[in-house]
Image: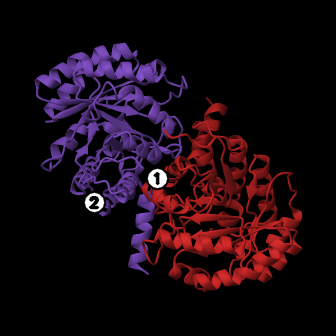
Chain colours: A red, B purple
């Protein structure tokens, strides 16, 4: 096997992407405890919430209150999603130090998701990124539907490269390439990376896989073989797939931590404490989260407690 | 990416390994319809049942009735699990044409599973394999715990090689290497195959992964990169993990079919009809099966029916 990176950064999206895509609106207190438990488990980047319309996305209302109450751990990043300048104002008021903006590689998806063409969304972000950078903030750019679109089907990797270029031209520090509907397979991961890696450094690109069709861990392993070392994941696999209700969304942080550690790759995360963080949300939601490793780990705990 | 095989054989274990490891005993009629639906979907090898003690394994009682009622498709293999000569007699009486025997790479596991040392189990199979071969049957050998043992932990790949040798020396035609508790990761798959492939042809070895920790598809992809092309799987991911109740067991046939087809690898299986076969069992059991692709596929069907 090709030499794999010795260390990987897992960018945790559970509190934002996860909690945003479930039916329940979770209380500020639970969110704060969840984020603090993730930091205590060793997660070093946690997307805490989104400064979006509370009417459009009730699950993300009170994101400001979460930031206000949160006790921050040294060395941990707590970015927030920000769709526009109004969102940036709110983020700045809440003491946010890092933000993320989002567009897509598919026009139809972007239009339906945020009612703007890709070019329009890039223009909308221009003053946001400019002001954020002036304030010393780092900005992450998300590109959705890099591996397939629920409306258009196949997505040309060249389109992914163009949007990635445009985002870096705006001044983002990192671009996260998303498999929004969880259709990617390892051969496709190779195809996209072959096109992007000659142009962008591995430190500049993250991969954001969904496990909707069970391929996420295989895609991460393939990306590792390409030297990639930043991956997005969601504690417990929290958050479903809005394009396939009842199906799995984000790849579970536990599943990546298990696979990475077993392959001798460090993450800085304590799996047992991570399971505690996910269990806290699972208890609140009252139904099992989809992470395979979470289920196996909890079963092992029960067996150890009652052999 | 290394050149992958163009065609893969999926050996279906749902009706046996899957239905054996759930709490419910499914009726003969449902089993027959399940196996026939799998064959109609293009599955070319289906392990139908086990000729074991009905007292010890009530889920496999009436395996003879399943074989008797089954309408066989031309070109489809219908092997049965057989633990001893008495089981072989029953299999022969039911018109079975291919059998499987099972041992392990870990002494403690084998002792607890079938109350025999590995050497004793090999001796027990000697007359079984001899008589089966005399009758023109092919015999498959299963080796459990090739990648880890619930009692002993790590398993030496050299031990896997020894047991595989012993099984071929008995006269089996194929050995299936099992990750019984679903702990394997791709680097480990490389390690085991590096040791075995200099000695055994790829046509002689199957891999049997469990998705208990979400690594099964990644392990299959790694095995493909090593040229392997026979994999065991269970429709819908049917069958839990007896060593971690509540956790996932066998990798789902749907998940492998999706990943393989998307990588341009043929299986001969129609995913839509495979979903029909799994849905039939899911309806009988009254709870969702764990396959990611099954869930996504059913969600897509609902969306297509009611856009």
Q: Position of residue A271 (x, y in %)?
A: 68, 42
Instruction: Point out which mark residue B290 bears.
Output: 1
Instruction: Point out which mark residue B115 bears.
Output: none
Say which of marks 1 and 2 sits in front.
2
| A255 or A232: nearer the viewer | A232
The quarter of the image holding the C terminus of chain A is top right
Quarter of the image holding residue B197? top left
Quarter of the image holding residue B296? bottom left
Label 2 residue SS:
loop
Q: Residue furthest front?
A: A198
Numbered disc total: 2
Question: Label 2 is found on which chain of the structure?
Answer: B
Q: Position of residue B115 (x, y in %)?
A: 41, 18
| B175 or B294: nearer the viewer | B175
Up/down of A33 relative to B232, above or below: below
Label 1 residue SS:
loop
- Binning the other alpha carbons within 10 Å of mark 1 as few (below 14), some (14 to 19) or many (20 upward) gives many
Residue that carries the numbered disc 2 in the rendered image: B270
Q: Residue at x 40, y 15 (%)?
A: B117
- Binning the other alpha carbons within 10 Å of mark 2 as few (below 14), some (14 to 19) or many (20 upward) gives some
Question: Label 1 is found on which chain of the structure?
Answer: B
Confirm or deny contact between disc 1 and disc 2 (CB under 8 A): no
């Amino acid at each position: 096997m090709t030499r794999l990176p010795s260390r990987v950064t897992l960018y945790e999206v559970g509190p934002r992407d996860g909690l945003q895509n479930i039916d329940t609106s979770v209380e500020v207190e639970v969110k704060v405890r969840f984020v603090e438990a993730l930091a205590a488990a060793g997660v070093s980047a946690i997307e805490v919430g989104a400064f979006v319309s509370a009417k459009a996305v009730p699950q993300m209302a009170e994101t400001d209150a979460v930031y206000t109450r949160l006790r921050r751990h040294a060395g941990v990043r707590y970015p927030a999603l920000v769709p526009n300048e109004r969102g940036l104002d709110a983020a700045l008021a809440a003491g946010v130090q890092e933000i993320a903006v989002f567009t897509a590689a598919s026009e139809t998806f972007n239009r339906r998701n945020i009612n703007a063409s890709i070019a329009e969304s890039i223009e909308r972000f221009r003053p946001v990124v400019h002001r954020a950078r002036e304030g010393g903030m780092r900005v992450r750019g998300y590109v959705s539907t890099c591996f397939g679109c629920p409306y258009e089907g196949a997505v040309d990797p060249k389109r992914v490269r163009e949007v990635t270029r445009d985002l870096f031209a705006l001044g983002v520090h990192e671009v996260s390439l998303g498999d929004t509907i969880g259709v990617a397979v390892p051969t496709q991961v190779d195809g996209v990376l072959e096109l992007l890696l000659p142009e962008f450094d591995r430190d500049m690109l993250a991969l954001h896989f969904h496990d909707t069709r069970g391929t996420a861990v295989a895609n991460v392993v393939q990306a590792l073989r390409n030297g990639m070392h930043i991956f997005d994941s969601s504690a417990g696999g929290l958050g479903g797939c809005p394009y396939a209700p009842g199906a799995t969304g984000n790849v579970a942080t536990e599943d990546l931590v298990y696979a990475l550690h077993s392959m001798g790759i460090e993450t800085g995360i304590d799996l047992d404490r991570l399971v505690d963080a996910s269990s806290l949300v699972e208890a609140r939601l009252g139904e099992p989260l989809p992470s395979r490793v979470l289920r196996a780990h909890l079963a092992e705990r029960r067996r150890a407690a009652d052999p």
